[in-house]
Amino acid sequence: MVQFIKMTEAAYAAYLPEAIKEYAEEKVKAGTWAEVEALDRSAAEYGQLLPDGIQTKQHYLFSIVDDPEQPPVGMIWFQLSESTHGRTAFIFDFKIEEGHQGKGYGRQAMEVLEQVARRMNIKKIKLHVFAHNTRAIHLYETTGFVTTDLHMTKTLN
């Protein structure tokens, strides 16, 4: 079973530029942002969400490891928030590295996340997934997530 280990400053320094780039690419692919503005907008969003990096309050960034002596197989980042409905975790980023996909690590990580959430008295876990990411959608649906909102776009000529 995989484990979550608090992300180190070094791991965060390696993660951030790649995450900014990947998020920009996903927003362009989804048709939400123009390519010319995507990197700047992505960097701005990350700057707003994580102004203090891994020390940002209520944000939890973990490396996902199968063997603590080996490099991580992935990462997860969620934010904790409080409301009248109780504590909620929102997953901002979740990734299993390409060479480790298809080995069950994603499913194991979702199980570990649930265990962590229960220990933190979290009542709901939420996330956003791009519609073109069918592999992730399948993982989330088969681990108990349900669609609560659906955004649709029609491009006019």
Image (spheres, rainbow, N blue to C red):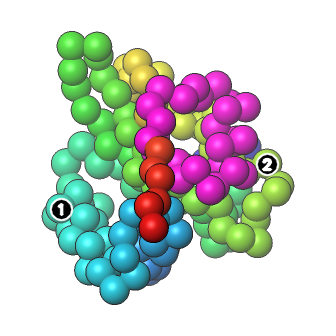
Whether residue 9 is visible to the viewer of this picture, yes or no, is: no
- As drawn, the label of residue 154 is none
Neighbourhood count class around disc 1 (C-alpha, 10 Å): few under 14, some 14–19, many 20 upward: few
Question: Which residue occupies 19% across, 48% down?
Answer: 57
Residue 105, percent from left and from top:
73, 51
Whether residue 48 is visible to the viewer of this picture, yes or no, is: yes
Residue 117, percent from left and from top:
45, 29
Question: Which residue occupies 29% across, 48% down?
Answer: 59
Q: Residue 42 magenta-drawn? A: no
Which quarter of the rendering shows the C terminus?
Answer: bottom left
Considering only order in the chain, which callout, 2 or 1, is on the residue closer to the N terminus? 1
Q: Residue 143 magenta-drawn? A: yes
Up/down of 139 relative to 155, above or below: above
**Which mark's residue is nearer the viewer, 1 or 2?**
1
Up/down of 10 relative to 138, above or below: below
Which sits in the foreground, 89 or 132? 132
Up/down of 120 relative to 103, above or below: above
Residue type at tag 1: Gln
Up/down of 139 relative to 26, above or below: above
Q: Using residue 15 as the reference point, say whether residue 133 is left or right of it.
A: right
Q: Identify residue for label 1.
A: 48
Q: Using residue 97 as the reference point, say whether residue 121 is left or right of it.
A: left
Q: Write down the region rendered in magenta.
A: 127-151
Residue type at tag 2: Gly
Residue 106, percent from left and from top:
69, 48
Q: Using residue 73 as the reference point, say whether residue 116 is left or right of it.
A: left
Q: Identify residue for label 2.
A: 104
Q: CA distance from mark 1 to mark 2?
A: 33 Å
Which sits in the foreground, 3 or 131? 131
Which sits in the foreground, 136 or 68? 136
Mark 1 residue element: helix
Mark 2 residue element: loop
